[in-house]
């Protein structure tokens, strides 16, 4: 038996090229795999989203007569579980598993091992490949990576059979929709199983659905006459008092939030305590209208007046007014009374959307997860939920229709699946996974002090990427060696105006204090692209990522930029600080930046203000133009951070936020690897420090290559650190160097991925 990765993938390609049709290809592929791996069964199932069933398409080992006949309900059986979770399932003694189901006529025996891997094409699950063996040593968990690449090879063939509309009862156009990714992969509704959203977390939560944040808006309020003015004024006072108490409770509870986050809360409290606002509403009530209607009129007029002032600061204040108006309104109509309440059971908030202030208000040990119908990946709520380690799934269409209050939910923030009232087998499977990940986390906790050293003694320093002050707790908890990237724009985004110098000094100083001597790389604010400040007017741009973004914007807003540079310099007196400038693409830019820094240093010297005179300056290398001129850019700085997110976006011409082209956003593209390699080599040649800090720095395959290049600092989301440390401790730097040399000669990402899976499949196990 050979498990040579490249050989098997080549054999599959050969079969596909030589076969007359996709059916024949699948038939020959399952035969080849069964032979090569000595498995007793190898089958391919095709998923029919129309009927939510699986059909046997090709098999060795099961009854051939059942091909095209056996249709399995996705809610049943182990292969159904592969489809539901879109992840490999490996089980020893499958017949003992609660999800096991015997199908009459399948000719299935009692097998000892079961491995099912989903066939995924353009992020849609099209079916599964399943292997089973009678012998226990036949197939193991270590084979999963190889079977994942086999599955990705076969997926295109299955997609083709789907395209041909060969699946029973599925029309050609629907088949096309499946392939193009425009149809839901699994059904929801009566007899439903789960809902799918956007995964933005690395955790799973369970609990009971809660609609505390059911919102009400002013357009739902109509004029209503009243007779008892006194009673109406009392209702209004109570609603205001409750609203103040709710927001004050947030302020008291949220002790560990930054000054910037606190500023939002304080603005709300100020309006709630403003007597003139209440007076205006009361005089409206005296016109014998309901408190709700009076509130609506005053709040909308107030907001309109602020908006009309044609001042971005004041028009932003109108949003504050609307926010607090809605809160008072919710209290008036009896919707808001629960928001300050303690949950008595494990709770999942289900809402259309919630504000970061509401999230801060409601956080408590019983709040286990959040499911939102709306929501953006970079929304403040998502950023905050991640800081607070609350699993969250966003963009779950239909959640408000399909989930009722008190439904039991599993919220899988990793896959984006939400299971309302899941069946016992799904619960059992998730409980098992939770138990496993708990065990892994416990074990990793014990390894927190271990260094990330390869088997041949090369150390990689693991840093944390942070955005909020509260992330510092996570950085410490997960054992970060340094703060490789502090994205300062997040506090800017949470505010209603640019933070003052004093506010920034206070914030950065707190970050440095919490870092307890670990170096902190503070990146100057990177806004524009997909992060817009509500208080800054932007030009209308067709391509904001290619437009007024990042350092270009900072240099144009020189006063604001100088304030930040001064604040970072002043904070540097309190801990090891480095300043990082994003999106540098020319020598001229870095010259201007360095001149500003020098200017500010002289001003501080003149005023006798302390700062770290040896503070290091660095640039993000994330625009491809910086790479060929890196030797010249390095004359002006001490270190480089590689931002693989933007580097990939600009190098490959793939919008990093566009789902439609996500398949092209591949860190294993040979151009990405060669470019990062070039950056690392130039930095080594000129003796400059380097840290890789995009999302790729948390992915094993990429890390292995970075190690091979000689990179010794990487930085990532804090919760990824334990897994990455474990990975680094399991591989050899020498081997990484050897594999990198091979990879640098390869033609495409598929070949590179196959090579890495082959190497790491054996290296990791
Ligand atoms: C990057 O571009 O890789 C990076 C780390 O910066 P950001 O994700 O903030 O653009
Ligand atoms: Mg970037």
Image (cartoon, rainbow, N blue to C red):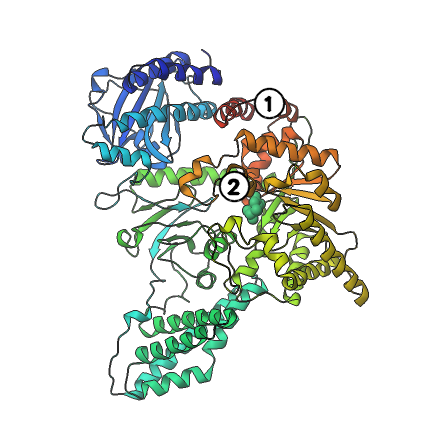
Q: Nearer the viewer, residue 403 or 491?
A: 491
Of pointers 1 and 2, the one earlier in the residue sequence: 2
At x 18%, y 31%, the residue is 169
Image spot of residue 62 (x, y percent): 27, 17
SS assignment at label 2: helix
Q: Nearer the viewer, residue 377 or 211?
A: 377
Which of discs 1 and 2 lies nearer the camera? The answer is 2
SS assignment at label 1: helix
Residue 649, numbered circle: 2
In the displayed structure image, the side of residue 618 where residue 436 appears, left or right: left
Image spot of residue 340 (x, y percent): 42, 67
For the N terminus, the image quarter is top left
Q: Image height check: is 760 above or below 514?
A: above
- The part of the image, by quadrant, that contains residue 223 is bottom left
In the displayed structure image, the side of residue 523 where residue 79 appears, left or right: left
Q: Which residue is labeled 1 in the image?
A: 739
Q: Is the CB of mark 2 within 8 Å of ligand 1?
A: yes
Image spot of residue 42 (x, y percent): 33, 18
């Amino acid at each position: 038996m050979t498990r040579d990765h490249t050989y098997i993938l080549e054999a599959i390609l050969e079969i596909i090229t030589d076969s007359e049709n996709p059916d024949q290809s699948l038939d020959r592929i399952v035969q080849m795999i069964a032979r090569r791996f000595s498995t007793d069964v190898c089958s391919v199932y095709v998923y029919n989203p129309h009927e939510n069933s699986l059909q046997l398409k090709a098999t060795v080992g099961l009854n051939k007569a059942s091909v095209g006949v056996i249709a399995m309900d996705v809610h049943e059986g182990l292969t159904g579980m592969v489809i539901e979770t879109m992840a490999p399932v490996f089980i020893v003694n499958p017949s003992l598993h609660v999800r096991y189901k015997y199908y009459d006529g399948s000719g299935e025996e009692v097998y000892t091992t079961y491995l099912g891997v989903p066939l995924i094409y353009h992020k849609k699950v099209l079916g599964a490949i399943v292997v089973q063996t009678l012998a226990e040593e036949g197939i193991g968990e270590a084979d999963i990576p190889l079977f994942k690449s086999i599955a990705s090879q076969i997926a295109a063939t299955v997609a083709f059979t789907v395209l041909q509309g060969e699946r029973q009862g599925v029309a050609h156009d629907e088949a096309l929709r499946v392939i193009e990714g425009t149809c839901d992969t699994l059904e929801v509704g009566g007899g439903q199983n789960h809902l799918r959203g956007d995964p933005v977390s690395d955790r799973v939560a369970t609990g009971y659905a809660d609609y505390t944040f059911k919102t009400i808006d002013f357009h739902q309020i109509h004029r209503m006459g009243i007779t008892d003015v006194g009673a109406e004024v009392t209702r209004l006072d109570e609603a205001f008092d409750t609203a103040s108490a709710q927001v004050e409770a947030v302020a008291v509870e949220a002790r560990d939030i930054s000054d910037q986050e606190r500023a939002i809360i304080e603005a709300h409290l100020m309006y709630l305590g403003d007597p003139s606002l209440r007076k205006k509403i009361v005089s409206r009530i005296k016109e014998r209208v309901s408190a709700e209607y009076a509130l609506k009129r005053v709040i909308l007029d107030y907001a309109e007046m602020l908006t009309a002032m044609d001042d971005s600061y004041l028009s932003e204040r109108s949003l504050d007014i609307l926010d607090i108006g809605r809160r008072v309104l919710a209290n008036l109509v009896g919707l808001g009374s629960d928001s300050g309440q303690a949950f008595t059971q494990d709770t999942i908030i289900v809402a259309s959307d919630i504000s970061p202030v509401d999230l801060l208000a409601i956080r408590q040990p019983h709040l286990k997860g959040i499911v939102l119908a709306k929501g953006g990946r970079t929304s403040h709520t998502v950023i905050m939920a991640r800081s607070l380690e609350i699993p969250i799934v966003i963009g779950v269409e239909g959640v408000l229709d399909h989930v009722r209050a008190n439904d039991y939910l599993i919220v899988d923030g990793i896959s984006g699946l939400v299971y309302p009232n899941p069946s016992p087998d799904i619960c059992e499977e998730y409980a098992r996974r939770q138990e496993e990940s708990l065990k892994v986390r416990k074990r990793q906790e014990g390894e927190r002090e271990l260094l990330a050293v390869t088997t041949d003694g090369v150390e990689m320093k693991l840093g944390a990427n942070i955005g909020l002050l509260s992330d510092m707790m996570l950085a410490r908890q997960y054992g970060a060696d340094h703060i490789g990237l502090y994205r300062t724009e997040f506090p800017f985004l949470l505010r209603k105006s640019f933070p003052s110098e004093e506010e920034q000094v206070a914030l950065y100083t707190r970050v440095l204090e919490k870092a307890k001597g670990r170096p902190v790389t503070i990146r100057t604010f990177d806004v524009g692209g997909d992060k817009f400040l509500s208080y800054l007017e932007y030009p209308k741009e067709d391509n904001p990522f290619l437009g007024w973004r990042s350092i270009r914007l900072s240099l144009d807003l020189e006063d604001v930029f100088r304030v930040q540079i001064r604040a970072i310099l002043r904070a540097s007196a309190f801990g090891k600080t480095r300043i990082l400038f994003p999106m540098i693409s020319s020598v001229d830019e870095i010259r201007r930046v360095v001149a500003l820094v020098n200017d500010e240093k002289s001003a501080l010297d003149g005023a006798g203000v302390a700062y770290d005179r040896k503070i290091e300056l660095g640039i993000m290398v994330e625009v491809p133009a910086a790479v060929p001129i890196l030797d010249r850019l390095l004359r002006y700085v001490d270190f480089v951070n590689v931002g693989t997110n933007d580097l990939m976006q600009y190098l490959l011409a793939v919008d990093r936020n566009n789902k439609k082209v996500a398949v092209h956003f591949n860190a294993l593209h040979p151009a990405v690897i060669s470019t990062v390699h070039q950056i690392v080599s130039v930095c080594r040649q000129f003796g400059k420090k380097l840290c890789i800090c995009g999302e790729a720095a948390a992915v094993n395959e990429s890390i292995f290559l970075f190690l091979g290049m000689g990179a010794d600092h990487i930085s990532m989301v804090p919760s990824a650190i334990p897994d990455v440390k474990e990975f680094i401790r399991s591989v050899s730097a020498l081997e990484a160097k050897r594999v990198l040399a091979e990879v640098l000669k390869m033609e495409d990402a598929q070949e590179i991925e196959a090579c890495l899976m082959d190497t790491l499949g054996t290296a990791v196990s």
